[in-house]
Structures are given as structure tokens and as C-alpha cells.
Amino acid sequence: MQRTASTHPEGFTFLVWSGVGVGVLEDRREGPLPKYFLSPGERVCLDERVLPQRQPEWLRGRHACKQVVRELLGPELLMHQVEVLPGPRGEPQLHLSEGPGPLDVSISHTRTLSVAAVTARGQVGVDVEPMAPVEERLWHFFLSPAERARCEREPELALRLWVLKEALYKALRPPQPIPLRSLVPELGEGVLRLAPPFECELSFTFLPLRNHLLAVVHS
């Protein structure tokens, strides 16, 4: 992944990987993030659909996403002209009042870090998690029996598979919810393959970032 020299003074960093723009926004503010960058529709969504305790990370995620779009399309595009609203299944969707055709977006956040990935080609998924061991009691939620057996020998692998599968799920967007443990990718060098019913090949990358692990998956 290529890191550009573009670093926002509020803690925003822009990265580029395989045609995907990735923005990372750290929570460096002592008070809440201002809402000046929201469109009227986003303000309604924030007030009516986002719980108060989730609003700071929701705002950071949208802020990061809009910054990525401006990095990709140009700073003349104003923040409020980039609208991020929930799609049919709650996934973030980008709407531009000006600019080129549709862009695909994925957003993830922890308590201190928000990440947005944007691409003009295919579909993208991103996930970020703190760099900490995943409790073994949670493994059955996202690991297949064979993967659990491997993680018993290599416990550090559990976090990588969790982050990767979360990003993979977002990139795939299956029409019906499926358990993460049913996604068993065959991993190659920067490429993962899935057997039927998906039967597809996608690009992926990992990035250790400020005590977090980030995964991006791109179709």
C-alpha cells in the first residue's frame, strides 16, 4: 500500500492501494467533531438513526469518507456535496451532487480510529480492529472448524482472519446474511479465492496501523 504525503492536520492520512483510496482518521479532538460537513440528509440520518453513544464514530467515519473522495476527485468538491447515506441493508452508499459516476465505499471504526475505503472499480470492503488477541470463546463465530484447529497452533492468526473476513463480507455483500465462519477463503499472495457458491477471486491487503490491524478487500 502506498502512503501519500497528504496528512490532514486533524489526524487524517490518505493511502492508495490497487485503485482504492483509503482514509484513516484518528480521534485527536477533546470535544465532539463538528457537523459542518454533513448534508441535510446526513443530519436527519444522524439524528434519527444513530444512537447518541455511536454518533462520534459515525461522524468520524463520514468525515474520513468525504476526505477520501476529495483526495480522489479534487479539493474543489465541497464536503457537503459528498453524501454518505445508508443503503437497503444499512451499508454506506455514496451520492455526489457533482462529479463522475458511482463510487463504492466501505467504512469501519474503533473507539479511536475510523477508516474509509473508496473505489471507482468494483466493490470494496474494509475493517479495522485493535491489535489485540481475539478471545478463544469468540472463534466459533467467524472461524470454520479447520481454521479453529489452525488457530490453536497459531493464535495470532485469529485476528488476521477476523479482520479479513469482516472486510470480505462487506466487499461481497451477500443478498442474505450469512455467518462469517461459512466464508473460508484460500489465501494467495495478495489474492483470495472462494469456492462455490461465491466462486470468485478478490485482491486483499493488510496494514498494521497505530496499534490496529487494517484489512482491505477489493473485487
Image: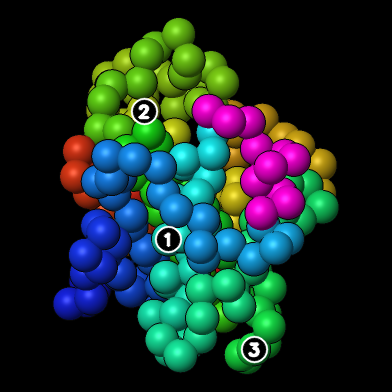
Q: Is residue 45 above or below residue 66?
A: above
Picture residue at 17% right of the left edge, 77% below the top? 5
Residue 3 showing in the rendered view? yes
Is residue 93 toward the left or the right of residue 111 in the image?
Answer: right
Q: Earlier in the sequence, mark 3 or mark 1?
A: 1
Picture residue at 65% right of the left edge, 46% below the top? 46
Q: Earlier in the sequence, mark 1 or mark 2?
A: 1
For the N terminus, the quadrant is bottom left
The residue carrying mark 2 is: 158
Residue range in magenta is: 43-53
Work out which residue is located at the far top of the displayed protein and give it.
Answer: 137
Q: Residue 131's spot in the image, x, y percent?
A: 25, 33
Whether 176 is among the magenta residues is no
The residue carrying mark 1 is: 64
- Label 3, label 1: how many angstroms apart (C-alpha)? 19 Å
- Label 2, label 3: how many angstroms apart (C-alpha)? 42 Å
* Residue 39 sits in quarter: bottom right
Q: Residue 164's spot in the image, x, y percent?
A: 44, 44
- Residue nearest the observer in this picture, 139 or 28: 28
Q: Residue 188's spot in the image, x, y percent?
A: 38, 57
Is residue 98 toward the left or the right of residue 16 in the image?
Answer: right
Residue type indicated by callout 1: Ala
Label 3: which secondary element:
loop
- Label 1, label 2: how many angstroms apart (C-alpha)? 27 Å
Please name the predominant secondary structure of the magenta segment in the image: helix
Residue type indicated by callout 2: Ala
